[in-house]
Image (cartoon, rainbow, N blue to C red):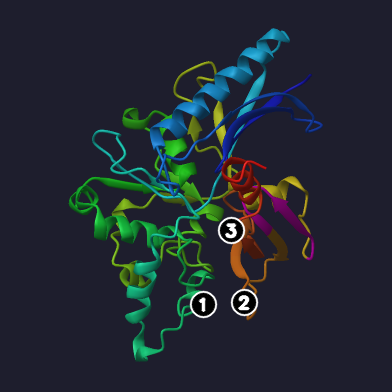
Amino acid sequence: YGPLVGAIDEGTSSARFMIFKAASSEIVCYDQLEVISIPRKDGEQDPLVILDIVEKCMEGAIKKLEELGIKDIVAIGITNQRESTIVWDKTTGKPLHNAIIWLDMRTSSTVDHLVDTIPNNSRNKNYLKPLCGLPISTYFSALKIRWLKDNVNSVKQAMKLKTAFGTVDTWLLWNLTGGLSGGVHITDVTNASRTMLMNIETLQWDSHLLKFFDLPKHILPKICSSAEIYGNVYKGSLKGVPISGCLGDQQAALVGQCCLKRGQAKATYGTGCFLLYNTGSTIVNSTHGLLTTVGYQLGKKGTPVYALEGSVAIAGAAMGWLKDNIKL
């Protein structure tokens, strides 16, 4: 078999752990479990359940691998549902609220409030696009953090001192590398580019954006590249194995489909539908509603590669709705 690599794929509807042959990308085995949103709160998922399901998938896949008489995993990576927002207490490790997932619309009122603060009464939702590549929209993490700050008292109080924010990759990385026992609080450039808080050119948290959303910098993870060793798995069958890759799910699909040249594109049909187009090292600003995002950065010294993205929130989720509600 040769060396193997493992991949955590934590999506909106399911999580799985897949094991590949490093040389050929051939799948050896995997384990998959459904991620269920909290009943009557379709825009929320329990962060502890997400973590538990991921750990069960890892152990399930390793068990299958051992049945084949092999366990030579040299590294693992993470790909995750993007923009979904988790805040937790750094002193207890416990979430301060359920995860607000990316397609939740409760931040509509937050969007309206923030658009009203734009200078010259322009109400231009693209006001921040030159800085972060994104329009002011319900999708992005900054709106979700701001909603939590404005509406959840425990978050508002904790934010002054001990809150950690992360998208799902950050939550998993922190816990898998030890959590309260030295877990790393980091994210990668692709996930950070979906928060509305990272400068699309410098790839660092931007003080102007933080001021606009009235959010403190100390809650944010460190931004890393998409391919470097972030830390080692703290416990379980994979204890000691380095975690060395991290990309948001759509950017991971861009890389996984080998769209590594400028002009190449991929379309993914999952819960939603997403088309990403590789624009190389050029930051392209769309005037037709596309998002400007980081495609990937392979290594600390790697050149960041950008992409244009077209997003449709509901694709496969419509099939689920028809099956579960209309009983088709």
Q: Amino acid at mark 2?
A: Asn
Binning the other alpha carbons within 10 Å of mark 1 as few (below 14), some (14 to 19) or many (20 upward) gives: some
State yes or no: residue 125 in magenta: no
- Residue 298 visible at all: no
Query: Quarter of the image containing the C terminus?
Result: top right
Label for residue 313? Answer: 3
Binning the other alpha carbons within 10 Å of mark 2 as few (below 14), some (14 to 19) or many (20 upward) gives: some
Nearest to viewer (mark 3 / mark 1): 3
Instruction: Determine the residue positioned at 82% across, 32% down.
Output: 24
Instruction: Determine the residue positioned at 23% across, 45% down.
Output: 162
Q: Are marks 2 and 3 in contact (CB under 8 Å)?
A: no
Furthest-bottom residue in this view: 120
Instruction: Determine the residue positioned at 17% across, 51% down.
Output: 157
Label for residue 98? Answer: none
Q: Earlier in the sequence, mark 1 or mark 2?
A: 1
Q: Is residue 104 left or right of residue 119?
A: right
Dividing the picture into quadrants, the one containing residue 292 is bottom right
Residue 40: % across, % down: 40, 44
Q: What whole-number distance in Å separates the C-alpha atoms at marks 1 and 2?
A: 8 Å
Residue 29: % across, % down: 71, 22
Nearest to viewer (mark 2 / mark 3): 3
Query: Quarter of the image containing the N terminus?
Result: top right
Range of the magenta residues? 263-274
Q: Are marks 1 and 2 in contact (CB under 8 Å)?
A: yes
Furthest-right residue in this view: 24
Label for residue 285? Answer: 2
Label for residue 130? Answer: 1
Q: What whole-number distance in Å separates the C-alpha atoms at marks 2 and 3?
A: 21 Å
